[in-house]
Image (spheres, rainbow, N blue to C red):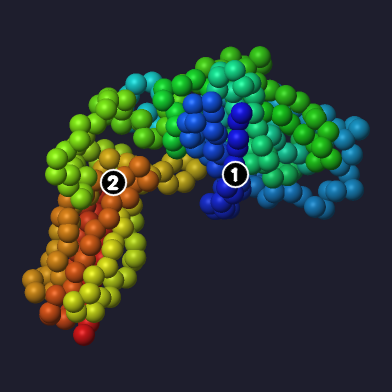
């Protein structure tokens, strides 16, 4: 039995739709991945729908098809270099002979005997097609979060008129590149053997050990909270997120060594640990403890050559 749960998140004006799907299969393996849709046009018009054209959207005379599709992989989506990707981007060129509203449904096949599956979470918003143009179409992005151990997937889309009439289907039968797509989720896209059984430590450290850092992939560090005001004798947790820029937004980078440097902090604050490793969500957590002296202290977080600074203010 395949179960799919969805979680919709608004990312930005360009990210018009996000669905998080969790798939539970016979082995009780939890799977999680995201699907993002972004329409494109020569005018860069990404409005979800042109309501002014509703009176002239009859599907009886409209011809709406997917003329071709393509699959691409960004350089940072295969961190361990084994040919399996955590992130896959698809481009589908859509053409019509008149202005018409449409939507797309996404399907995935894991070659596990269950066949194609989809859900409401894999349905895009309604967009407007302005007619024939090689630039008209839709981008779709898969980011595989968990549960995928060097597996192969197939992808297809169904194209519908706004009234629910099926206009076209496009998949591996039309383009072999949409079959046997090699994917693995973020927790397996690491250097070393991701399937090796870890050896338990008799005295485990409360902080991860920085090994095989991925600092070369990092383009920015985000500190949360951005303003730190602490009373004497109190403490606060600080989260530092390492990410890299992608064509559709920031992508978290796991397994990154984040270091701390404190300026003029003697007698004011203590920070631990001084070095930490980002988790699968690209986050490293630090604890700041205010001491007896009040005043401001400058703290710098570093991942390779990327730096981010914050001022810690200790008050009475």
Q: Please tell me whether mark 2 sits on a helix, a strand or a loop.
A: loop
Direction bottom: furthest residue: 316
Compared with residue 316, is residue 216 higher up or lower down, i.e. above or below?
above
> Which image quadrant is residue 6 in?
top right
- Image point 18% across, 77% down: which residue? 233
Circles 1, 2 touching at the beta carbon (< 8 Å): no
* Alpha-carbon span between mark 1 and mark 2: 26 Å
Q: Residues within 10 Å of mark 1 (few under 14, many from 20)?
A: some
Residue 138: x and y in percent read: 63, 36
The mark found on residue 6 in the picture is 1
Look at discs 1 and 2 and give the one toward the viewer.
Answer: 1
Question: What residue is disc 2 on?
Answer: 278
Q: Residue at x 45, y 28 (%)?
A: 148
Query: How many C-alpha atoms fall within 10 Å of the one at disc 2: few (<14), some, or many (≥20)?
Result: many
Horizontally, residue 208 falls left or right of residue 252, namely: left
* Observer-nearest of 173 and 91: 173
Q: Going by the image, does 154 lie left or right of 253?
A: right
Q: Position of residue 236 (x, y in %)?
A: 27, 68
Q: Quadrant of the C terminus?
A: bottom left
Q: Is residue 7 left or right of residue 307?
A: right
Judged left or right of residue 157, residue 167 is right
Residue 290 - label: none
Residue at the image point whose x is 22% and y is 38% from the top: 213
Q: Quadrant of the N terminus?
A: top right
Which quarter of the picture shows residue 177?
top right
Instruction: Tell me where residue 79 appears, x and y as whole percent.
Output: 33, 31
Q: Position of residue 217 (x, y in %)?
A: 31, 39
- Residue 94 visible (yes or no): yes
Q: Secondary structure at mark 1?
A: loop
Q: Which comes before the other along the chain, label 1 or label 2?
A: 1
Q: Quadrant of residue 110?
A: top right
Query: Furthest residue to the front?
Result: 202
């Amino acid at each position: 039995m395949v179960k799919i749960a969805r979680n919709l998140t608004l990312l930005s004006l360009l990210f018009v739709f996000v669905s998080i799907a969790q798939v539970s299969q016979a082995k009780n393996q939890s799977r999680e991945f995201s699907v993002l849709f972004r329409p494109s046009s020569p005018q860069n018009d990404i409005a979800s729908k042109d309501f002014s054209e509703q009176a002239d959207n009859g599907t009886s005379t409209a011809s709406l098809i997917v003329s071709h599709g393509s699959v691409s992989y960004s350089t940072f989506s295969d961190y361990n270099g084994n040919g399996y990707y955590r992130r896959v981007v698809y481009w589908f060129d859509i053409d019509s002979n008149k202005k018409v509203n449409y939507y797309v449904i996404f399907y995935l096949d894991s070659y596990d005997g269950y066949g194609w599956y989809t859900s409401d979470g894999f349905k895009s918003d309604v967009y407007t097609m302005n007619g024939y143009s090689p630039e008209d179409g839709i981008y779709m992005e898969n980011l595989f979060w968990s549960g995928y151990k060097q597996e192969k997937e197939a992808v297809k889309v169904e194209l519908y008129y706004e009234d629910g009439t099926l206009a076209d289907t496009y998949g591996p039968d039309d383009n072999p590149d949409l079959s046997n797509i090699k994917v693995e989720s973020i927790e397996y896209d690491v250097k070393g053997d991701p399937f090796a059984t870890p050896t338990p430590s008799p005295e485990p450290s409360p902080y991860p050990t920085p090994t095989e850092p991925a600092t070369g992939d990092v383009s920015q560090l985000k500190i949360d909270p951005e303003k730190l005001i602490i009373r004497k004798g109190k403490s606060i947790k600080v989260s530092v997120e390492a990410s890299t820029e992608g064509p559709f937004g920031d992508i978290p980078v796991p397994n990154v060594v984040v270091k701390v440097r404190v300026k003029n902090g003697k007698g004011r604050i203590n920070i631990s640990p001084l070095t930490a490793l980002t988790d699968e969500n690209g986050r490293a957590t630090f604890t700041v403890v205010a001491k007896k002296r009040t005043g401001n202290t400058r703290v710098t977080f570093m991942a390779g050559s990327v730096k981010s600074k914050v001022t810690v203010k200790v008050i009475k």
